[in-house]
Amino acid sequence: MSGQTTVERRPAAPATPARTPAPSRPPRKGRVLTWLNSSVVQALLIVVALIWITPLAGLFLSSLRSERDNASDGWWTALTDPSQLSLDNYTALFEDSGIAGAFWNTVLISVPATLLVVGVAALAGYAFAWLEFPGRDAIFLVVVGLLVVPVQIGLLPVAKLFGAVGLFGTVAGVILFHVAYGLPFAIFLLRNYFAEIPREMLEAARMDGGSEWRIFSRLVLPLGRPAIASLAIFQFLWVWNDMLVALLFADSESQPLTVALQSQMRQFGSNIGVLAPGAFLSLVVPLVVFFAFQRHFVQGVMAGSVK
């Protein structure tokens, strides 16, 4: 028809099919937990635990048997004959003034050495992480450099120094040595952990009028509890099980349990009636401490490996 404009219609473009979103991968922490929950891994862990527990069980049963029974047959016979078991060895152990005194010396050395290292390292770690002062980075590099100094290098010079000031052969001397050699790693660990705290959180606390001590005690310490608990476990285990430092710096009145047991072994050889309960007592205390702080220890390890 004339006078009308013909409009050309174009074919509609084919609709683009909706893209199916790719399945999201579970977070890394979830993958790790899924792997750990698998039956194969659990079975493997059970086997490893049994292998690890067997010597501990043998030591415990030997400590409950008389020296005659231990000399005649193996500790596993107590599983079928419980009448062999008694607490006589432990009674005799604590009646021995040398072993009992060594046990309390170990407590007097381990607890202050752990508390001092954790307390000083927490203060220094916060200062290196969040306080500005001249030479901060240079001093921290010196602290990190002390990590490579072996303990054996400092034994003779420190022994001469302690002898000159009257600390050689005392509990205080052993504590100071452990504190001095435990601080570099402790400061390095806590400084790196405290540095991960969000700056905005600390600035908000300062804007609210919080002092540095209040921020440290009310904010930083609670947030750093996993790392502090892990450090306390490591330091306590190292000091409790140490024999090299105590063998050199402690005398007969200040020697810990490790040195006392080594002396018993050297003098009496196979005195199982004293060595077995003493060794089990020396072993069970670190186990109790570890399991008491296990939750915080796992939190500290996971915080440093999984985000």
Image (cartoon, rainbow, N blue to C red):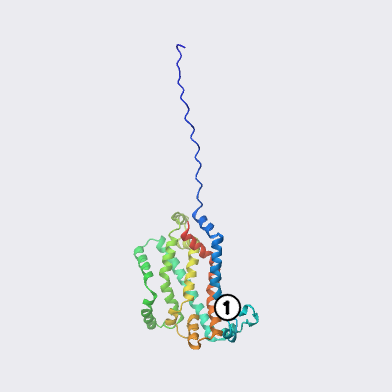
Between 210 and 71, the residue placed more toward the observer is 71
Q: Quadrant of residue 295?
A: bottom right
Q: Quadrant of residue 126?
A: bottom left
**Number of marks in the rendered image:** 1
User: Residue placed at 54% from the left, 65% from the top?
Assistant: 44
Between 100 and 298, the residue placed more toward the observer is 298
- SS category of the residue bearing label 1: helix
Tell me the kind of residue under disc 1.
Answer: Phe
Residue 270 located left or right of residue 153: right
Instruction: Pick out the residue farthest to the bottom.
Output: 267
Could one spot residue 221 in this view of the protein? no
Between 46 and 171, the residue placed more toward the observer is 46
**How busy is the neighbourhood of tag 1: few (under 14 within 10 Å), some, or many (20 plus)?**
some
User: Residue placed at 37% from the left, 70% from the top?
Assistant: 148
Vertical position of residue 296 compared to residue 151: above or below: above
Residue 55 located left or right of residue 164: right
User: Residue placed at 47% from the left, 73% from the top?
Assistant: 238
Q: Position of residue 235 (x, y in %)?
A: 47, 71
Q: Which residue is mark 1?
A: 60
Q: Position of residue 22 (x, y in %)?
A: 49, 45
Q: Position of residue 250 (x, y in %)?
A: 44, 82
User: Residue placed at 56% from the left, 67% from the top?
Assistant: 46
